[in-house]
Amino acid sequence: MSISEDKEKIYDVRYKVLLVGESGVGKTSLIRKLVGTATNKNHMNMLSTIGIDFVKKLYEVDGAKVQLEIWDTAGQERFRSITKMHYRGTKAVVFVYDVADLDSFTRLNFWLESIDQELQCSVEDTPPMIIIGNKSDLEDKREVPTERGEKLADEKLANGFWETSAKQGTNVHACFEKLAYTLTDTFSPKLM
Ligand code: GDP
């Protein structure tokens, strides 16, 4: 259960989560929705231009306080590389595409292929990752069938696949909460 944003160090364990994907797929909107500040469209548009480093979200997983520190890479995708600072200490990667933009899905392969190299880990050590097809509310403009996203997630051995709508809030909380559970299972099986 999501309990609150932390104002002090009130977590038992903290995991850095990196959000990657093409510009405009909704990364900033997703995390703003997650922390509850994406209240209207104008606000969402404004936020896409200002850039942020990370947001913190606290979950309770089997009695332990688990903080996700979610890093937004929006604004830096055009360089096709994210600074080392962004990658350092990453414990999970969230790959985001736009279901109404086939190019954003196709280009996800760039992000998927580069991540092992960027995180300087072997394929076996790849951190948990999930794939998100955002903008599921744009059903009439959909270019990527759900099955293609599911298939990609299967092929890449992703820990989860979700279709979300940052605009409507669909699945946004559910997928990050599930990620908190996955990270706890992966890294702190005996946390309690
Ligand atoms: P980023 O560059 O990946 O961070 O993308 P943004 O969060 O800035 O979003 C890009 C544009 O897509 C903005 O105009 C958002 O309002 C819009 N957007 C983001 N998420 C959704 C969504 O779930 N549905 C719809 N219809 N629009 C969205």
Image (cartoon, rainbow, N blue to C red):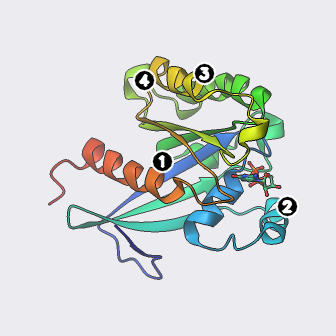
The three-letter code of the residue at mark 1 reads Gly
Depicted 125 relative to depicted 169: above or below: above
- Identity of the amino acid at label 2? Thr
Q: Is mark 3 on a helix, strand or loop?
A: helix
Name the residue beneath numbered marker 1. Answer: 89
Callout 3 touching callout 4 (CB < 8 Å) = no
* Tag shown at residue 190: none
Q: Which mark is first along the chain, 4 or 2?
A: 2
Q: Mark 2 CB in 8 Å range of ligand 1?
A: yes
Residue 145 lies, in percent from the top left, at 64, 26
**Gap in Å between the C-alphas at discs 2 and 4?**
33 Å
| Disc 3/disc 2 C-alpha distance (Å) | 27 Å
Q: Please state which of the two labelled residues, at mark 3 or mark 4, is closer to the viewer.
A: 4
Does label 3 point to a residue whose CB lies under 8 Å from ligand 1?
no
- The answer to whether marks 3 and 2 mark residues whose Cβ atoms lie closer than 8 Å is no
Label 3 sits on residue: 113
Name the N-terminal-most of marks 4 and 1: 1
Q: In this view, does 17 lie to the left or right of 31?
A: left
Residue that badge 4 annotates: 157
Q: Is mark 1 on a helix, strand or loop?
A: loop
* Residue 46 coordinates in the image, percent (x, y): 84, 67
Q: Is residue 70 left or right of residue 140?
A: left
Circle 2 packing at 10 Å, graded few (<14), some (14-19), many (20+), is few
Judge whether 15 appears above or below 47 on screen.
Answer: above
Q: Which of labels 3 and 2 is toward the front?
A: 2
Residue situated in front as seen by the camera: 116 or 142: 142
